[in-house]
């Protein structure tokens, strides 16, 4: 079992997952790997209310559109009307151990997050607080693609599933794909048959309940540029080169 003291003192580290990973023990490294592979953003605030760790999904989610704003190691609300709600939720978790769901943002970009207090460890003045960021869409595109591959869906059928998961009607999907409504209905029927879904609602629910997948390409170093290929030699050229070499 992983001991909490196996983890590095993240509060004393710069905001660098690589450094935290290098200083962790092997069991703790596995734990950090697991957290980074979760496609739910997780942010850890220390007992001073400062961000001491955020997994890969959280760093991706906290973009220019997210209601939460990360400046240095301070987490702030982007919109003034969320300031009091965020402060009360974090204070309640840190001081009174209260869990709650918090809704932030505007109607167009509204996000729900879970505020979870963590028990203080020896040497800590107070509780840490974990934030679990909610999804901004029902089904992640990568999850849909793996779902489609697992059920043998065609590219056109995969596009239909993505449209249904984005809450589009069959008519809207037909307009987007540039095909007739009858074609989309036929493809929906085929998808339902392949996935054994009794209805469109059941199909979307099936995809929404899948574990979200993180792309294997995220966080990897770019591949080196391929070497240019030498032009193939025809037979006379090969014979001439062989003769010169001899």
Image: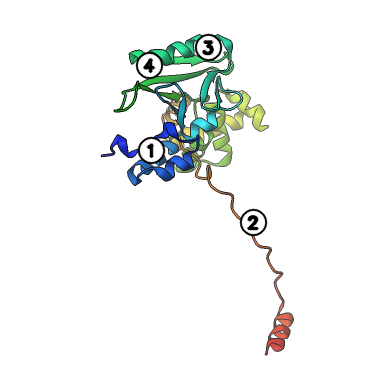
Name the quadrant containing residue 229.
bottom right
Q: Earlier in the sequence, mark 3 or mark 4?
A: 3
Q: Looking at the image, is mark 3 or mark 2 nearer the viewer?
A: 3
Q: Earlier in the sequence, mark 1 or mark 2?
A: 1
List the residue tagged with mark 1: 8
Query: Which of the 4 image quarters holds residue 230?
Result: bottom right
- The residues tagged by marks 3 and 4 sit, at their Cα atoms, a distance apart of 16 Å
Tell me the number on the disc at residue 83. Answer: 3
- Residue 139's place in the image compared with 216, above or below, is above
SS assignment at label 4? helix
Alpha carbon separation for disc pair 3 and 1: 31 Å
Q: Position of residue 10 (x, y in %)?
A: 42, 34
Q: Cβ–Cβ below 8 Å for labels 3 and 2?
A: no
Q: Which of 123 and 21 lies nearest the eye of the viewer?
A: 123
Mark 2 or mark 4: whose residue is earlier in sequence: 4
Between the C-alphas of marks 1 and 4, the distance is: 23 Å
* Label 3 vs 2, first from the N-terminus: 3
Residue 14: give x, y in percent of width and height. 49, 35
Q: Is 202 displayed left or right of 237 in the figure?
A: left
- The quarter of the picture where residue 29 lies is top left
Q: Earlier in the sequence, mark 1 or mark 4?
A: 1
Q: Tell me the residue that label 4 is attached to.
A: 93
Mark identifier at residue 225: 2
């Amino acid at each position: 079992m992983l001991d909490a003291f196996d983890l590095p003192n993240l509060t004393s580290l710069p905001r660098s997952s690589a450094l935290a990973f290098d200083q962790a023990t092997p069991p703790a490294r596995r734990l950090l790997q697991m957290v980074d592979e979760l496609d739910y953003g997780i942010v850890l605030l220390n007992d001073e209310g400062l961000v001491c760790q955020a997994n890969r999904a959280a760093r991706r989610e906290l973009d220019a559109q997210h209601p939460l704003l990360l400046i240095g190691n301070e987490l702030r609300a982007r919109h003034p009307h969320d300031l009091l709600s965020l402060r009360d939720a974090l204070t309640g978790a840190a001081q009174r151990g209260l869990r709650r769901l918090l809704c932030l943002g505007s109607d167009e970009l509204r996000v729900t997050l879970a505020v979870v207090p963590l028990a203080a460890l020896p040497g800590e003045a107070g509780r840490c607080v974990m934030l679990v960021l909610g999804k901004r869409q029902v089904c992640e595109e990568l999850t849909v693609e793996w779902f489609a591959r697992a059920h043998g869906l065609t590219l056109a059928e995969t596009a239909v599933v993505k449209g249904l998961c984005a809450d589009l009607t069959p008519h809207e999907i037909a307009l987007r794909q540039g095909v007739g409504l009858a074609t989309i209905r036929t493809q929906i029927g085929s998808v339902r048959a392949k996935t054994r879904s009794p209805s469109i609602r059941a199909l979307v629910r099936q995809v929404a309940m899948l574990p979200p997948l993180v792309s294997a390409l995220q966080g990897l170093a770019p591949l080196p540029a391929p070497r240019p290929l030498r032009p193939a030699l025809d037979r006379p050229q090969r014979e001439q080169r062989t003769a010169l070499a001899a």
